[in-house]
Amino acid sequence: MVFLTVLNDQIYEEAGLLGGAVDFIEKSRSFSILFRRLEVILDGRKKGAAAGNAPHGPDILRYGPVKLHRDVSRVF
């Protein structure tokens, strides 16, 4: 589980991580940073990360029904 939120106080981040989140990402981060962090998680390079599906191309990161389209900065 990855939290993508506007809440940036340490107490929320700690609660999310204690609740089982793999990462806690503020919405203020750029799409490229979000893409890279999710790539790290899905590749299993982060402790506790679930294995995801392989990317379908250099600009698309896919995990189950979720697709991150880097080229258009959209998540479907």
Image (tube, helix red, strand yellow):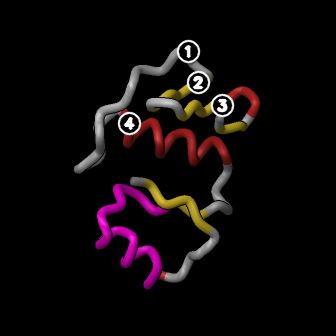
Residue 21 drawn in magenta: yes
CB contact under 8 Å: marks 3 and 2? yes
Q: Residue at x 30, y 33 (%)?
A: 51
Marks 4/2: CA–CA distance: 13 Å
Which residue is more in the foreground, 66 or 46? 66
Residue flagged by tag 4: what amino acid is it? Leu
Say which label, 4 or 3, has the lower sequence index.
Answer: 4
Residue 41 location (% of width, % of height): 37, 42
Q: Residue at x 39, y 24 (%)?
A: 53
Outermost residue, left side: 47
User: Are there few (<14), some (14-19), or many (20+) residues within 10 Å of tag 4?
Assistant: many
Outermost residue, right side: 72
Residue 34 location (% of width, % of height): 57, 47
Q: Which residue is mark 3?
A: 70
Q: Which residue is mark 2?
A: 60
What secondary structure is marked by label 4? Answer: helix
Marks 2/1: CA–CA distance: 5 Å
What secondary structure is marked by label 2? Answer: strand
Which residue is more in the foreground, 33 or 44? 44
Figure check: 56 above or below 38: above
Residue flagged by tag 3: what amino acid is it? Arg
Q: Which residues are magenta?
A: 11-24
Residue flagged by tag 2: what amino acid is it? Ile
Q: Which residue is mark 4?
A: 42
Q: Which residue is mark 1?
A: 57
